[in-house]
Amino acid sequence: MQARIRVVVAKPGLDGHDRGAKVVARALRDAGMEVVYTGLHQTPEQIVETAIQEDADAIGLSVLSGAHMTLFRRVIELLAERDATDIVVFGGGIIPADDIAELEELGVAKIFTPGATTASIIEWVRANVTTPVA
């Protein structure tokens, strides 16, 4: 039997706008995934620690503050340091196309921009995040 996909949804940095993150977290949960929402103002260190402790398959970051390059990069670095690069990192926010390409080069699997539907996010997670066999 396939285990349920476990996703940590996080709001790193000082950005206080979490409505989108909560909508995505609820949509993933309603689609049958296990979701841990970390709340506002999380550091990359806290997010990675939560993902490892929760045995997450993926981390979804919501970044609207403009600090996306720094925050995504740090999460990717910390996962590498903790030998946890099997955790898929994806996210969303107001991120310029040039930055999306650079984030993907760093190892971010997918960036969703404003207007992305919850259905498209669910579909992408199901297609791109694997879980261990239970």
Image: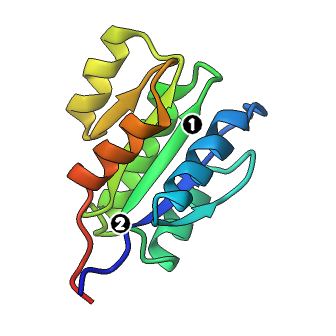
In the image, what residue occupies the spot 32% across and 61% down?
Answer: 87
Q: How far apart are labels 1 and 2 at the CA level?
A: 17 Å
User: In the displayed structure, does residue 113 sit left or right of residue 102?
Assistant: right
Q: Residue at x 32, y 80 (%)?
A: 3
Q: Which of the 4 quarters of the picture holds residue 15?
A: top right
Q: Amino acid at mark 2?
A: Asp
Q: Is residue 16 left or right of residue 96?
A: right
Among numbered discs 1 and 2, the one appearing first in the sequence: 2
Residue under the image location 78 percent in, 33 percent down: 16
Find residue 113 and report its horizontal and vertical position in percent.
Answer: 45, 20
Identify which residue, 75 or 18, lies in the foreground.
Answer: 18
| Label 2: which secondary element | loop
Q: Amino acid at mark 1?
A: Ser
Badge 2 density bin: few <14, some 14–19, many ≥20, Cα 10 Å: many
Q: Secondary structure at mark 1?
A: strand
| Residue 11 visible in the picture | no
Residue that label 2 marks = 57
Residue at the extreme right of the image, as rendered: 16
Judging by the rendered image, the residue that carries numbered circle 1 is 62
Q: How is the image coloured?
A: rainbow
| Residue 102 position within the rendered picture, expressed as x and y whole percent measured from the top left | 28, 22
Question: Image check: 56 left or right of 81?
Answer: right
Indicate which disc residue 92 carries.
none
Q: Position of residue 124 (x, y in %)?
A: 29, 43
Task: Quarter of the image for the N terminus: give it.
Answer: bottom left
Above or below, 100 relative to 89: above
Is residue 24 something that shows in the picture?
A: yes
Q: Tell which of 92 and 66 is nearer to you.
A: 92
Label 1 crowd (10 A; few <14 / some 14-19 / many >=20): many
Who's the residue at 37% across and 35% down the image?
120
Task: Identify whether 91 is placed above or below 1.
Answer: above
